[in-house]
Amino acid sequence: MKTYQKFIVSTFVLSATVALVACGKSTTKAEKNESSKADNVTTITVATDADTKPFTYSENNQATGYDVEVARAVFKELPEYKLKVEITDFDSVVAGVDSGRYQLAANDIGWNKDRAEKYYFSAPLSKSNNAVAVKSDLKVKTLGDLAGKSTEVLPSANFTTILSKYNDANPDKQVKLNYVDGSYPTASRLADVDSGKIDFLLYDAISLKTIIKDKGLDTLKVNNIESESTDPHDGFEYFLYTKDEKGKELQTKVDKVLKKLQSNGTLKELSEKYFGGDFVPSADAYK
């Protein structure tokens, strides 16, 4: 009887062991399938300074804003990629794309010829006006009205290029450019206008109005600058990519999604949420 009981127990243990091994094999296979899927997903790191509200800023220690949320909306449509957002200072945004550390930059980036030789640009994300923030008693309509006035600029910013080109073309009516570090916030530069340390800040109208309102800088006003440019990119902002095969592939895929998001109203919805109005380019910009 005892021998029979031992046989029954041994048989049960053996059966249970076989069952567990079988389950283990099944789980391992499923895990391998998931691992295989993960291996096919490419991580795209997008760089932003989170200091260009409302295009990009930090909220609860997380990057957000129009450009960042457009990027997130785009990559929801591209399951072959996983999006990672990294906050850095402005100078490192573009330099990081240049080095390959980042595959995409989202930071209210304007087009210029020098950049176009080194990077790929997306279809436009939004269209604003170049403008200056000045004390309310200063009248400004053109860059010429800023002759002899001082400002603070970032070394690699598009607005710095605009002012540098103006100075080159007008040696007798120079604007005084004081270079500051890329980590010096836009809000601090506007505070410097408010305090009289500098006379103006050239930026896009959307950002200037947003930051002035947020910081309560009531002595400042925003004047649109009459553009003398015939550049078709004037006023638009873009994503920036590495200028290589991978960057070109990313540009093609993202542009296709941006066209869809413009058509279905997603970009308009985000623009109204973050800009307080519809600043989305027309459908012609996505052809």
Image: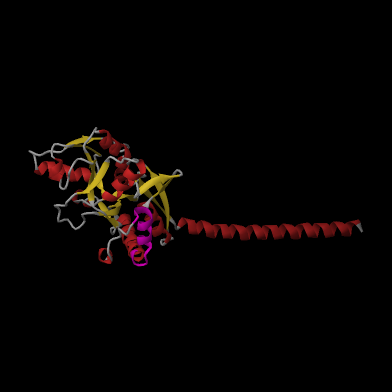
Which residue is nearer to you in this view: 11 or 211? 211
Q: Position of residue 46 (x, y in %)?
A: 37, 49
Q: Quadrant of residue 183?
A: top left
Q: Quadrant of residue 157?
A: top left
Specify the quadrant that holds the C terminus: bottom left
Specify whether 277 is left or right of 24. left
Q: How many numbered discs?
A: 0
Which residue is nearer to you in this view: 30 or 198? 198
- Name which residue lies at 30% across and 47% down: 209
Which residue in the rendered view is the most extreme toward the left? 172
Q: Position of residue 32 (x, y in %)?
A: 54, 58
Which residue is nearer to you in this view: 283 or 200? 200
The answer to whether 285 is drawn above or below residue 155 in the figure is below
Specify whether 6 is left or right of 47. right
Which residue is nearer to you in this view: 284 or 33? 284
Q: Position of residue 119 (x, y in %)?
A: 26, 51
Residue 201 visible in the shown view: no
The answer to whether 152 is drawn above or below residue 101 in the figure is above
- Name which residue lies at 14% across and 56% down: 230
Specify the quadrant that holds the N terminus: bottom right
Residue 149 visible in the shown view: yes
- Name which residue lies at 71% across and 60% down: 19
Residue 11 in the magenta stretch? The answer is: no
Residue range of the region highlighted in magenta in the rendering: 262-276
- Name which residue lies at 23% across and 54% down: 235
